[in-house]
Image (cartoon, rainbow, N blue to C red):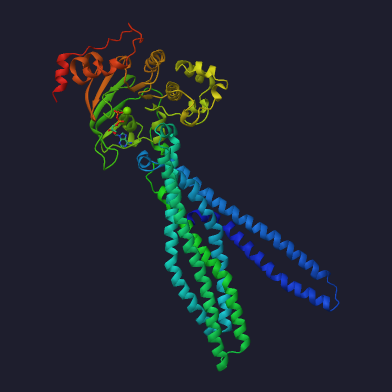
């Protein structure tokens, strides 16, 4: 797993490790040269040569050491960069259904915090394992040359320590994993609170949210402390093993000296080797323990990378959308948001020809927004087909499919950034003339004119510095700037005042002459303008027709028209524009609704 991220940097990593080894070697040579220098001094010889050699070694040691550590750190950062790049590209391609099931704050923690832990794994862990392991092997070989019997004794002790470490190490892994999971929980709670801070404050829920945050922080602390405990135990096991090895070698070696199997010099040399073994063993053990933290983080990263993602673009094999209006068709579409949730669409069918306006009406929860989500292919239906221009949306290249569509979501999301960025989000190439024109038609020109920084004004997190109606108009302008072949408006004018709403209604009517427009509407004034109305209820299409037809033929529509639309139609809405007036509640129709 880790190798996938390290492989591209294996040569620099190896170079850095080699530089560290060479640095160590130059350090070891210093005492030798110093011995020569003292030797020269005591024999009254010139010391220039030795001095130059020493200075050169010191400088080389410092320079190589700095270079080595720079190369290693840099490589570690590159590994982190690689993981962050992979993960952030992947998260942008996630299927909406996968995002529905996860916490954005936790995903954020995986990109920011978990990837950071790969840094240590690369430098300390991998390099420590490499250099420490190498030194270890070299020392063991030397020991074998000096006395195989004592080597066997030493190895037996080390083996025992290895078994103990084998028990300890999984604990470190588990604790690290839980600590990182707690960081994820904390990210999720933070995102939850900061995303709705006004609501939290207004509900007086700060204390409870504070508790949740603290609990996650404390859990992370608890698990990190647990990991530290096991790491300390691992480190001390290694230290203890070396002490035991030392004593055992002394005892066994002493006995061997007594029987004359080895001489004292061999024993002393061997004990020195045991002493030398300590540092590399500590290195290897700490490399192993640190690797546990890294691999716990890596597991969390891999988990995010295994969430279902959208297919990559297959632009070459799919039709190139033209500029003419699109036709949409639903054929017996069945859909549920997740396997454990009840169906939302029970066989939805309707036809929308190219051009003109189609309105979707129905009670809240009927599945209107879901229709739009399915057209955008945020989700795939369980059964049935959705056709755009006669081609199953599943067969469309996703970017091409979406580039045909302008979508204004129900809650008109605005992103943090400037007004201009928000407007050009869907079409960065739009020129200033087109921008000015769209600002006029969406009646944003007044707002932009009023703002001291105009289009460069920052709108705040999720556009909090704009009013609800302004956000909706920004979202509509953004969709219009894409010059879509299919415009989806989901209650896009619900928060506008009557004057602005009437203006935008005219704009949409204008757009509908050259584009296919689907609107989920909640005002009678919008619905009555539509060329056809699709009445939805509880995941089914009840009826399709014009306003007059439906008022006569569909009790639910008549009811909606008589009550809900009526309630939200302003008295100031322009009259006499060919819009039939609201239908008065009709006793007979109401009677029909009461019957199932
Ligand atoms: P409408 O727009 O007609 O008011 P929706 O299409 O938004 O209705 O929702 C239809 C049903 O699907 C509702 O019962 C809602 O609770 C459910 N629903 C909507 N979005 C999701 C989602 N992302 N995950 C699970 N259920 C959802
Ligand atoms: Mg909706």
Among all residues in the image, which is located at the extreme top?
Answer: 576
Relative horizontal placement of residue 264, taking residue 352 as reference (left or right): right
Tell me residue 47's x, y (percent): 83, 71
The N terminus, quarter of image: bottom left
The answer to whether residue 552 is seen in the rendering is yes
Look at the picture and state if 113 lies above or below 241: above
Look at the picture and state if 249 lies above or below 231: below
Residue 163: quarter of image: bottom left
The C terminus, quarter of image: top left
Tell me residue 469's x, y (percent): 42, 21
Residue 249: quarter of image: bottom right
The residue shown at (42%, 44%) is: 211
Q: Quadrant of ligand 2?
A: top left
The residue shown at (40%, 37%) is: 205
Relative horizontal placement of residue 393, taking residue 65 as reference (left or right): left
The answer to which of 154 and 397 lies nearer the viewer is 154
The total number of labels drawn is 0
Tell me residue 482's x, y (percent): 45, 25
The answer to which of 228 and 429 lies nearer the viewer is 228
Residue 494: quarter of image: top left
Tell me residue 235's x, y (percent): 52, 67
The residue shown at (33%, 7%) is: 575
The answer to whether residue 388 is seen in the rendering is no
């Amino acid at each position: 797993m880790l190798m996938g991220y390290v492989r591209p940097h294996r040569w620099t990593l190896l170079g850095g490790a080699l530089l560290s080894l060479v640095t160590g070697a130059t350090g070891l040579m210093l005492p030798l040269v110093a011995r020569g220098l003292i030797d020269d001094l005591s024999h009254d010889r010139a010391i220039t040569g030795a001095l130059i050699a020493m200075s050169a070694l010191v400088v080389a040691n410092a320079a190589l050491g700095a270079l080595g550590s720079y190369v290693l750190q840099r490589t570690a950062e590159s590994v982190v960069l690689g993981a962050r790049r992979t993960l952030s590209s992947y998260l942008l391609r996630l299927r909406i259904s996968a995002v529905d099931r996860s916490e954005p704050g936790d995903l954020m923690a995986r990109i920011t915090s978990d990837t950071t832990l790969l840094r240590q794994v690369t430098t300390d862990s991998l390099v420590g394992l490499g250099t420490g392991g190498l030194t270890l092997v070299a020392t063991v070989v030397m020991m074998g040359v000096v006395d195989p019997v004592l080597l066997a004794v030493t190895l037996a002790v080390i083996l025992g320590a290895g078994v103990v470490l084998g028990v300890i190490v999984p604990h470190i892994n588990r604790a690290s994993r839980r600590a990182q999971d707690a960081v994820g929980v904390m990210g999720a709670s933070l995102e939850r609170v900061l995303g709705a801070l006004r609501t939290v404050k207004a509900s007086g829920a700060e204390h409870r949210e504070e508790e949740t945050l603290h609990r996650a922080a404390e859990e992370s602390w608890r698990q990190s402390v647990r990991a530290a405990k096991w790491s300390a135990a691992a480190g001390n096991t290694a230290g203890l093993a070396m002490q035991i090895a030392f004593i055992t070698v002394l005892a066994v070696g002493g006995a061997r000296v007594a029987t004359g199997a080895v001489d004292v010099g061999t024993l002393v040399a061997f004990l020195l080797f045991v002493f030398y073994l300590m540092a590399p063993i500590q290195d290897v053990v700490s490399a192993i323990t640190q690797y546990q933290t890294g691999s716990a983080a890596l597991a969390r990263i891999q988990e995010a990378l295994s969430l279902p993602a959208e297919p990559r673009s297959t632009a070459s094999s799919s039709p190139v959308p033209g500029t003419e209006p699109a036709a949409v068709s639903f054929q017996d579409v069945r859909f549920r948001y997740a396997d454990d949730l009840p169906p939302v669409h029970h066989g939805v069918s309707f036809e929308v020809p190219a051009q003109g306006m189609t309105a979707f009406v129905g009670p809240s929860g009927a599945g209107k927004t879901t229709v739009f989500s399915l057209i955008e292919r945020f989700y795939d239906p369980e059964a049935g087909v959705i056709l755009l221009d006669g081609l199953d949306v599943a067969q469309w290249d996703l970017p091409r499919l979406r580039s045909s569509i302008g979508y204004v979501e129900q809650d008109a999301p605005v992103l943090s950034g400037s007004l201009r960025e928000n407007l050009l989000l869907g079409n960065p190439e739009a020129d200033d003339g087109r921008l000015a024109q769209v600002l006029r038609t969406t009646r944003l020109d007044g707002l932009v004119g009023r703002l001291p920084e105009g289009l460069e004004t920052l709108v705040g997190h999720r556009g909090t510095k704009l009013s609800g109606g302004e956000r909706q108009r920004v979202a509509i302008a953004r969709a219009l700037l894409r010059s879509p072949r299919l415009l989806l408006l989901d209650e896009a004018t619900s928060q506008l005042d009557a004057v602005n709403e009437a203006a935008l209604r005219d704009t949409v009517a204008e757009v509908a002459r050259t584009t296919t427009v689907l609107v989920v509407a909640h005002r009678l004034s919008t619905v009555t303008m539509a060329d056809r109305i699709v009445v939805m209820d509880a995941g089914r299409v009840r009826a399709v027709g014009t306003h007059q037809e439906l008022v006569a033929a569909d009790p639910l529509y008549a009811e909606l028209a008589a009550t809900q639309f009526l309630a939200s139609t302003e008295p100031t809405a322009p009259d006499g524009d060919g819009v039939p007036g609201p239908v008065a509640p009709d006793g007979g129709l109401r009677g029909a609704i009461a019957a199932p």
